Amino acid sequence: MDRSMKHPTHTPAASAPARRRRQALVWVVGLLVTAVMVGLGLWQMQTFRDQGQDAMRARMTQPAVPLESVVQVGQLPRDGYGRPVVARGSYLPERQVLVPEAGHPGRFRVLTALRLADGTVLPVVRGVVEGDQPPPAPGGRVEQIGLLLPTEAEPETELPPGQLGTVRLPRLAQAWPEQLIPGFVSLGDADATAQGLTPAEVAVPSSAGQARNSGYALQWWIFAIAAIAATVKLSRDAARGTGLMAVGNVDKAGDNAVGDTPDTGDERPASTPAGDPSPSSSADADTRLTREDA
C-alpha cells in the first residue's frame, strides 16, 4: 500500500448546543441592529419635525412682504408659505363660502375672493363668525395683511351649498371661474377685527424639505428590514451548520467537539519506547541465533 496516500480531510460538525448558541447570538445581534436602525429613523423624523416647526413659527413673525414677490399664478411659492404677505385688491362678495371650524359647531371661517390688479383671485379667510350670517366684506380697493398658506386637505364630507369642508383650492377652482393664486391668506388680528370677525386660528404649515427628510427616515427603516432578513438567513444557517455559519467559517476559538481532532493524513509509525525492541528487530535476532546454532 502506498504510504504517501493521505486520508481525506473533513470539517467536524458542530454539536447541537454549539449550534443553538450561535443561533441565539445571531438573533441578539440582529435584533439589536434592527432596533438601532428603527430608532434612527424615528429620530430623523422627530428632529426634522421639531426644527421645521420652530423655523416656521419664526417665519410667521417676519415683516410682511408683497404677495407678488413670493407667489405667481401657476407656480408654487418656493419660500412663501407661512410668511406674512400684503395683498391689494377688491373683494367679490358673490364669491364667498363658509368653512366649518372643526370641533366648534356653529362656528365658520369666512372665505371670500379678493380680486387682484391683474384679474387673478386670492382666497382670503377674513376671520371667524358665530352662525351663518357673516358681516359683509369691505367695499372698494383694500390692503390686507395675513399669512400665506397652502391648500388644505380634501374635505371628508359634503356640505350644503355655500359651505366647504376645508379651504381646498381645487374645489374652489371648480366653483369660482377666475384664475386662482396657488395659496390662500388668513388675515391677521387687526384686519379680521376691523371687519367685525374673530381672527382665525392658523396651524403651523409644513416646512420645505419634508419629502427629502422622510426619505432619509425611510432609508433607515429599509436597512432595518434588511437586517431582519439577514438575521433570519443566518439563524437558519446556524441551525444547520451551513453557509456562513458553517463550522469552518466561524469556529476560530476551539469550539470543535471534544475528540474531533482534524486528521492531518500523516501515517508515520508510532515511536517505540526505549528498551522495547520492535517486532522486526526481534525477528532478525532470532534468525541470527538459529544460524549460529546450526
Image (cartoon, rainbow, N blue to C red):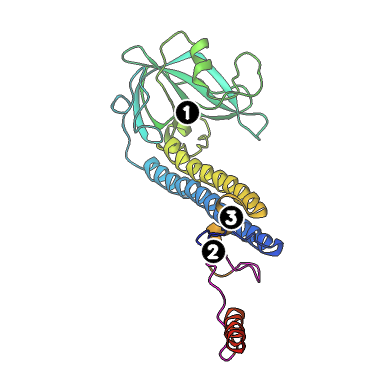
Q: Quadrant of the C terminus?
A: bottom right
Q: Position of residue 198 (x, y in %)?
A: 53, 34
Quote the CA–CA distance across marks 2 and 3. 23 Å
Which residue is labeled 3 in the image?
246
Characterize the local packing of mark 2: few (<14), some (14-19) or many (20 or more) Cα atoms within 10 angstroms: few
Q: Compare residues 126 and 287 and report the one nearer the observer.
A: 287
Mark 1 vs mark 3: which is more N-terminal? 1
Residue visible at 63% across and 33% down?
102
Q: Position of residue 142 (x, y in %)?
A: 36, 22
Which residue is labeled 1 in the image?
195
Q: Which residues are magenta?
A: 255-275
Please indicate whether residue 222 sits to the left or right of residue 67 in the image: right
Magenta portion: prevailing SS class: loop
Quarter occupied by residue 113? top left
Which residue is labeled 2 in the image?
265
281 relative to 257, above or below: below
233 relative to 118, above or below: below
What's under tag 2, amino acid-wise? Answer: Gly
Q: Position of residue 86 (x, y in %)?
A: 34, 29
Please indicate whether residue 68 sits to the left or right of residue 125 in the image: left
